[in-house]
Image (cartoon, coloured by chain):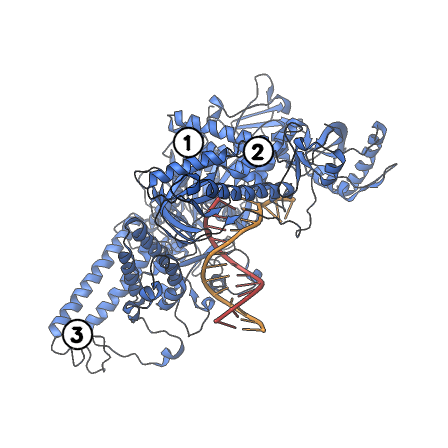
Chain colours: A blue, B red, C orange
Amino acid sequence: MMGHSVCCHVHGFEPYFYISCPPGMGPDDISHFHQILEARMKEVNRNSKVPQYVRRIELVQKRSIMYYQQQTSHPFLKIVVALPTMVTSCRGILDRGIQVDGFGMKSFMTYESNVLFALRFMIDCNIVGGNWIEVPAGKYKKTAKNLSYCQLEFDCLYSELISHAPEGEFSKMAPFRVLSFDIECAGRKGHFPEPNHDPVIQVANLVTLQGEDQPFIRNVMTLKSCSPIVGVDVMAFETESEVLLAWRDFLREVDPDIIIGYNICKFDLPYLIERAETLGIAEFPILGRIRNSRVRVKDTTFSSRQMGTRESKEVTIEGRVQFDLLQAMQRDYKLSSYSLNSVSAHFLSEQKEDVHHSIISDLQNGNAETRRRLAVYCLKDAYLPQRLLDKLMFIYNYVEMARVTGVPISFLLSRGQSIKVLSQLLRKSKQKGLVIPNVKQAGSEQGTYEGATVLEAKAGFYEKPIATLDFASLYPSIMMAYNLCYCTLVTPEDARKLNLPPECVNKTPSGETFVKSNLQKGILPEILEELITARKRAKAYLKEAKDPLVKAVLDGRQLALKISANSVYGFTGATIGQLPCLEISSSVTSYGREMIEHTKKLVEDKFKMLGGYEHNAEVIYGDTDSVMVQFGVDNIEAAMNLGREAAEYISGTFIKPIKLEFEKVYYPYLLISKKRYAGLLWTKPEKFDKMDTKGIETVRRDNCLLVKNLVTECLHKILIDRDIPGAVQYVKNTISDLLMNRMDLSLLVITKGLTKTGDDYEVKAAHVELAERMRKRDAATAPNVGDRVPYVIIKAAKGAKAYEKSEDPIYVLENNIPIDPQYYLENQISKPLLRIFEPILKNASSELLHGSHTRSISISTPSNSGIMRFAKKQLSCIGCKALISDKDRTLCSHCKGREAEFYCKTVVNVSEQEMLFGRLWTQCQECQGSLHQDVLCTSRDCPIFYRRKKAQKDMAEAKLQLDRWSF
DNA sequence: GGCGACCCCTAA
DNA sequence: TCAGTTAGGGGTCGCC
């Protein structure tokens, strides 16, 4: 634990996989089979020159994980090949079938032939991601000629490795060296930087030891001179090559274990590599720990239903984990914007400047001072990822996830959910002598099954406490209670043939048969049990722990354990996955459906007046694993007691470990429809915990802030303040502000994810069409697949579709394009409001949406399109806005005589606007960290930016008005 | 204007 | 070669 980097060359571990041994195959047959396979491998792998492709074939006793089998083992052939890649080609040969004497043309089901070599090695050596490995003294030998840049390097046999379970002393985290970096490039005017044209002009670096709160190195490498920065080592170079090589040398010197940054995988790292290629610096891309090994860059796309399609690049740097904070944020948090700026504001309450790429070149081409300006900006972009890493405890959470699931840390950002379950399954199977078949991708159509029950929602505003009863980890506990697993499933055919006594099997509501644990204990239930007891243990330790670092580890662990337990069910239902088994997943959901119905019935049957209770209980809603019960009592404590009683009573009717729990009361409770509700949440009778909203606009990322704020505020007034008139007034004021054009543009920005590439869309949609238009304006900055597209709806000809009216907010601001308030009223705010108010207010529609406040006419900038183009701009009276002729200049005939009053007003207005703008400007200057420089920030995600721009416009308008008074 | 297809996002 | 599940609300578009 000294903090040295180590390269250990592990010898003797060979790639292999299994096939089931055809019945009647003896040692001679195997040897013959080996020869045939070797010959076929030679044909297929003509390029790789090895003395022998199939090293050996061993006869072993194993059992397939699929289906309950009475015999404990069968003969399998373990096929050991020369190189990891040959597993795939050998599998291909066996899949397609080969001619075997005496057995005819035969194709073989292969087992564990799709396990990545690195994972295979880890599994067989009991190594999990992020754990400690010991190589005992005397069992290794120093490498004669160093093949790596590591501080220690030696050779050993794989069988000598001792993997330590991450417990006690070994649960400590290694003192990783973390490098956070960011680069700046000088793009040409109007173009996003491209590595084959535009130079890298700065690289900022921060190096931190894992567990410490301050970096021990801060530096920046600049092209051309740069004024000094306090606390930062500024290194200026005359040529770009020098900058790049200085960075490479620095990286090799620091020898970081983890490289972090924001969007480094898709931008910074590939840019550096490609730029060095353009400049012909062949010695640049040696950044890993293997001597003279070059960094490789490959385009990749990742697509899953959970995360949509996402394009990225795979950058191989041996011995260093790349942890891109952008990827981590996108995986772990649902946000409406993932810009570094917005994410920092959200989690760190810290803004950063967003300098448009076109301005960067100007700063570079200035002097040492402007370049210093840029360097400060660049440093901040290296600093914020480190802050996010610390604040969100990514290292702890990811290392613990790797330890729990057994996959390497890098898999957690580059691969999906299923590899984690598979890794656990493979480990457990190995212990039990089971092997996992490589099932061929079944037809995509068949894979659909029935999910959970959602009880009918009795919509309404409930002013009596609503108790909620929840099943704790429903799906995992069903799988444990009924021993559902691949290896306990009985095929319909076997069910008839084996004639198993009914007391030995469970017949699931979906009609499948699984044996009980006395015949065969399921692997999945065993994994789940371990995950759940491990989580209980972690939580218990967490309570005891004092050291914040230990606490961080334990909290990360309990979180990882919970997530892992919950994803086991999903794994079995993933039809395009490693080992789908719909018999398991559909049985799980069928038990779940039965249980929620049973719970509803039991509550309503027992808690009624005929049963001696004061009221009849009513289940008003329920989803998957929860029921919402109105016991009829008025007070919270009584509802809580009944809730506890019901939970205990109903739990008793289920098999262990299925448990129904009482957790909370909603009071009051606004139930809008299935999956949509709001209420005050109480876990103790003294004080409510918080306002809880599910499914409605307040928690959706695709609603504009106007709607979110309005709905939140109304719910606050209705639920907490119990002030319905106040809520109504608030709505009226907001609508009036909107129609009067007093709405900040930042409140009107709608964002939607671009889930597929342009031509894959079947119908036109606002965000898709805008992305396409933006691509035509500037392809490099337009949104890509996987990005979120922010837009506003602008005024257009009557009857225009929304997809014709969507526009980039920045473009709207810069070109003074009027927005369409009517659209926001009719298509954004009216329906959500009605859904909230209708249960509590009669005539909600006329009250809220048709009052005098809706008749305010906006005085917006005339549209450039349509008929307005031909209208002559006419002056209006400064006093009353009536149209006036040119010769009157300021006031209409009615307002004449009040010149002094209106002049005064105009002057006051100008000074007010100036003050407002000044205040916002200073705010932006503070954000950029200097009060002496222009504000360059154009952040789409910063509300101040929109207000500053608007204030600037209003100020100019006010000055124009003032000018009209001077003759 | 009604209706289905498609799209997005969320609950659990 | 890789990708966790289904249920459900609600918006928009385009056709009838």
Q: Chain of mark 2?
A: A
Q: Where residue A878 sits: x, y (%)? A: 20, 74
Q: Give A180 or A939, whichever is nearer the viewer.
A: A939
Tag of residue A552: 1
Calculate the distance from the C-alpha at mark 3 to the C-alpha at mark 1.
66 Å
Residue type at the position of mark 2? Ala
Tag of residue A403: none
Q: Quadrant of residue A554?
A: top left
Which mark is nearer the camera, 1 or 2?
A: 2
Q: From this viewpoint, which residue is outermost toward the front? A: A610
Same chain for labels 1 and 2? Say yes or no: yes
Earlier in the chain: of badge 3 and badge 2, it is 2
Horizontal relation, residue A32 to residue A458: left or right = right
Q: Quadrant of the C terminus of chain A?
A: bottom left
Q: Disc 3 marks which residue? A: A965
Residue type at the position of mark 3? Trp
Which mark is nearer the camera, 3 or 2?
A: 2
